[in-house]
Image (cartoon, rainbow, N blue to C red):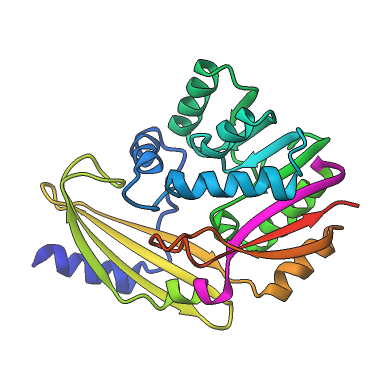
Amino acid sequence: MKILADLIYRQAKDIDNGLEIPWADPEFSRRILKEHLNQDNDIASRRIKAIDKQVQFIHHQLLMAKKTTILDLGCGPGLYSHRLANLGHRCTGIDISPASIQYAKEIAEKESLKCTFIQDDFLKPDLGSDFGFAMLTFGDFNALYRADGERLVEKIFHALEPGGVFLLEGLTLDGAMEIGERQPAWLTAESGIFSDNPYLYLEECSWNEQDQLAIANYYIIESVSGHLTYYRQRYYAYSDNEYQDLLSGAGFESIEFYPGFGAGSSDFADDLVMIVARKS
C-alpha cells in the first residue's frame, strides 16, 4: 500500500518531472540491446524479416541498386547499415547507445563491412557531407522537440550531396493519437529494459490536443527495495501536410509518401509512414 500511495503522490505532485529515457546510460544501453536483437517483439527494433524487406525497398526502389554513401541516424546495433553495406554501400551510423554502437562495430569488423559507427547524439555533431542517402527510421523523429526536429532536417539536407535522398519514417497522426489514448497498463518482470532485478511496470498515456502531443509515463517500482523511478516519453504528431511543409521548408523536393513496413507485428510498427524527399 505504501508503494501505491507513493506512486499516486508522485503522479499528483511531480507529473512534470519525469526523467528522460536514459538511452546513453551503459546499463540501460546493455539491456535495450537485447531488445534490439529480440525477434519476439518490435519494442526497440523491427524484426529481421521486416528489416530485410525495407532494406530491399531502399536498395532497389530508392537507390536503384546503385552504390552510394549512407547516413544512418539512430542506427542502433547497425541492423540496417550492416545489410546495406553487404549490398555494396558505404555506411556511417550514429547512435547515442554505447552497447549498440559497440555491437555494430564488432559485426562490421567481423564481416569486413564498409561501416563507420559513431556513439553520439545525432542532434549535436556535424553530420558530415556528400552522402547519397540519409535515413531516420522507426519513429525516432517523433520523440524530438519540434524545433530540434526542424533543425535536424536542415542538417540532413546540408549533409546530402545534390540528388541525395532522405528517408524519414515517422508516426502517422493517427498512430501518435493512438499512443496518447492507450489505456493504463501494468506488468511484472523478473528483469527487463528498466532493471536487471524484478520490477513492477505501470504505463499511463495522455493526448494533448492543443500541442498534438502524445505522452507516455512509465513508473518502475523495484520489487525488493520498493524504489520508484518515473520516466516520460514524448511523441509529437505530424499530419502528412506538416511533414511535407517541414521537408520542403528545409529545401527538399519531390516528396513522396509510402506505407510503413509494420508487417502486422506489434507496438506502433504498423502506424508509421515512409516519406522520401530528394535534394535537387
Q: As drawn, is 29 to the left or to the right of 126?
A: left
Task: From the viewer's perspective, tell me whether residue 267 is left or right of residue 158.
Answer: left
Whether residue 107 is in magenta: the answer is no
Query: How many callouts does the rendering have?
Result: 0
Residue 81 point in image, percent of width and height? 59, 35
Q: Residue at x 57, y 34 (%)?
A: 83
> Residue visible at 48% across and 35% down?
77
Which quarter of the image is occupied by the N terminus?
A: bottom left
Judge whether residue 71 can be spotted in this image. Answer: yes
| Closer to us: 18 or 63 | 63
Compared to 174, does 227 lie above or below? Answer: above
Residue 125 shows in this picture: no
Residue 41 point in image, percent of width and height:
34, 52
Q: Give residue 87's position: percent from left, percent from top.
A: 64, 31
Residue numbers of the magenta segment: 159-176
Along the horizontal axis of the image, is 129 left or right of 149? Answer: right
